[in-house]
Image (cartoon, rainbow, N blue to C red):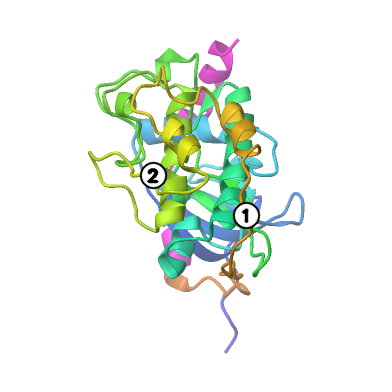
Amino acid sequence: MTSPAPPLPLAGRYQLLDRIGSGAMGSVWRATDLRTGETVAAKVLGAHDSAMLLRFVREQSLRIRHPHVLAPTGWAADDHRVVLGMDLVRGGSLDDLLAETGPLPTSYAVLLLDQLLQALAAVHAAGVVHRDVKPANLLLEPTGDGAPFLRLGDFGVAVPVEDVRLTRGPAAIGTDGYMAPEQVGGAAPDPRQDVYAAGVVAVQLLTGRPPRVGHPSLVPEGPLRPLLGAMTHSDPAVRTPSAAAALERLRRLDVPGDGPWPWVPDRLGEPTPARGRDRAAVALVAALVVVVVALAAYLLATAH
């Protein structure tokens, strides 16, 4: 009995290998980019309305190049499906690590915060606000018990600061607990909101406890307390003004070494062949490519 033929490459470019995750916008697969020969992560757009398509177009249009930013590297589409390609990060998320270890050593948390602030400084310098900084969107390379290497990902709700067309609406955009008070109140996107979220994440790294909705994060005692208190101030006018300013202040702190550091494993291992049901699910992924292309053209035309 012969084995079934592998599925055709998605949009003629991405050969899916195995599913490694899922989210609000669709499924995430390990795939081979036939254009480059590299193994990548491929986000396959699910069947959503035009608002979700707009988010997809917004995310795929980002081209921020920085070691700690996981921005899209390419995309492709055909009559039935659209897919977004990006680097494959194999160490899971910071959410996974915290679930396993609880509070992290201060020296380890400082390195993670340093890398997150580097990423946000690059994103903000490109005129973009992420709006959803949280442990689930912070991915880790598998570094074992060595120094961590963080990647800021999931730009599905990120917006250009100056693009008011994408920021209007009565509902707050972000994740409860990590949103700054003014963000919860529907204020226009501002880089200081990402600074607030980064501070909340840092508190969670030190305490192991996720933020409570409606309650400010209680910064623990220690060398980071003044900085994290300033980053999570409820008044944006008093809050640390930028990720770059927070990074500069962080690097002036005297943080003694401690440990032991946690282990970040390769959580993906070798790919397992896509099963028939998974191939069928991919075959049913519906996307209005004409709408995607039109929206992309509209965004590009109005951005100038």
Expressed as whole percent of the image width and height from the top left, the position of residue 149 reads 65, 54
| Image quarter in which the C terminus is found | top right
Disc 2 is placed on an element classified as loop
Q: Nearer the viewer, mark 2 or mark 1?
A: 1
Residue type, label 1: Pro
Answer whether residue 11 is visible to the viewer in this image: no
Mark identifier at residue 219: 2
Q: Quadrant of residue 126?
A: top right
Is residue 277 toward the left or the right of residue 182 in the image?
right
**Marks 2 and 1, how far apart at CA:** 18 Å
Residue type, label 2: Val
Within the magenta stretch, is there residue 291? yes
Residue in the picture at 34% in, 52% down: 210
Residue in the picture at 41% in, 17% down: 237
Q: Which residues are magenta?
A: 278-304
Residue bearing the label numbered 1: 256
